[in-house]
Amino acid sequence: MAIPVIDFSKLNSGESRAETLAQIANGCEEWGFFQLVNHGISDVLLERVKRVCEECFKMEREEKFYKSTAMNLLNELGQKNNGDKLEDADWEDVFTLMDGAEWPSNTPGFKETMGEYRTELKKLAEKIMEVMDENLGLPKGNIKTAFNCGVEDNGNGNSNGNEAFFGTKVSHYPPCPHPELVNGLRAHTDAGGVILLFQDDNVGGLQILKDGKWIDVQPIPNAIVINTGDQIEVLSNGRYKSVWHRVLVGTSGNRRSIASFYNPSLKATIAPAPELLLVEKSADQDHKHLDQIYPKFVFGDYMSVYAKQKFLPKEPRFQAVVRAV
Ligand SMILES: [Fe+2]
């Protein structure tokens, strides 16, 4: 069993468009994860991204990582050898790139390359959301508009904090001396919208939970792995599921993982799209029942709950956020 691999370029050809749409619908409905090849991001740019991220880790991150709390705690546990595991930490070096924030600056070409990469990935995220709109039978731009506080893109930008958030998490999972005692990243579902992951060519470790079993997201050089976050699950009224995933660590290889998130604005109100609410018609047409299993909430409130409950089941988060409103 392997995560679906989809040729995104076939979306543009008349003959194979319908089939490609169906493959993406299946990836969203049955898997919550799929891999895109021929996605339009050039290999030249992706090779530059690999190079600058590797250099950045070596120059600006590695030394600090090996002095980190996780490293010290793991060494202590390894010495005690009493069967305890490191439950509340991840074996992950991570920083996030976002507009208007400080970025690593000592690695030649890092800022330029990652800026270019983010521009391309954001465009790809928007294309994917349009495909989801189409597959779900929603008006074009529906998901993007919802994530941008109802403001349609008029080409002049969006302001007042209403615009969707686009962040890029650059992670490395270095070789671990005690992989049996710690996770690279503990199991969780993603809080936001659409996630686009550029993972390592060779070093695996990412797994998703499918039908009760953990399965590997197989590395494919220069593919982009797409997954749907909790807000897509809500907006699609559960047609698309936000799926549990985790990262295991190994003793060799330094896994690179660059995840870009297209998330709603913290001010955005998220709710199931009205078009997707099933109406149970009774014989008596006066009694129509709306099948809304997800609440309506403000994304910022959801994030406050998520910050405390990231590694717990998602369903209680939907309950908690209603109480928080
Ligand atoms: Fe995640």
Image (cartoon, rainbow, N blue to C red):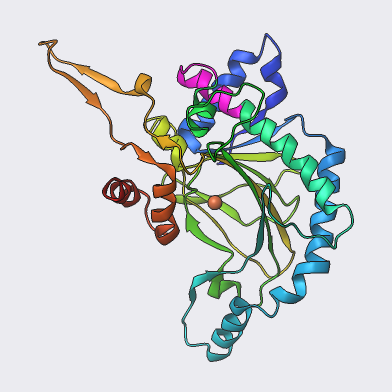
Q: Is residue 212 something one can see in this rendering?
A: no
Give left or right: position of 323 versus 312: left
Residue appearing at x 65%, y 67% in the figure: 250
Which residue is most to the front? Answer: 160
The relative height of residue 60 versus residue 257 in the rendered view (above or below) is below
Q: Quadrant of residue 176?
A: bottom right
Q: Is residue 193 magenta?
A: no
User: Camera-side residue: 214 or 320?
Assistant: 320
The image quadrant where one finds the N terminus is top right
Which residue is most to the bottom? Answer: 80
The relative height of residue 113 versus residue 17 in the rendered view (above or below) is below
Residue appearing at x 50%, y 37% in the figure: 31
Residue appearing at x 60%, y 32% in the figure: 158
Magenta stretch: dominant SS? Answer: helix
Give left or right: position of 153 versus 309: right
Q: Is residue 129 magenta?
A: yes
Segment tinted magenta in the rendering = 128-140
Q: Is residue 288 something one can see in this rendering?
A: yes
The relative height of residue 169 versus residue 59 in the rendered view (above or below) is above
Which residue is most to the left? Answer: 284
Q: Position of residue 246 (x, y in %)?
A: 53, 56
Give left or right: position of 283 versus 271: left
Q: Position of residue 164 (x, y in %)?
A: 56, 37
Q: Position of residue 188 (x, y in %)?
A: 47, 54
Number of numbered discs on residues: 0
Q: Quadrant of residue 55?
A: bottom right
Q: Quadrant of residue 211?
A: top left
Q: Position of residue 141 (x, y in %)?
A: 54, 21
Give left or right: position of 97 versus 27: right
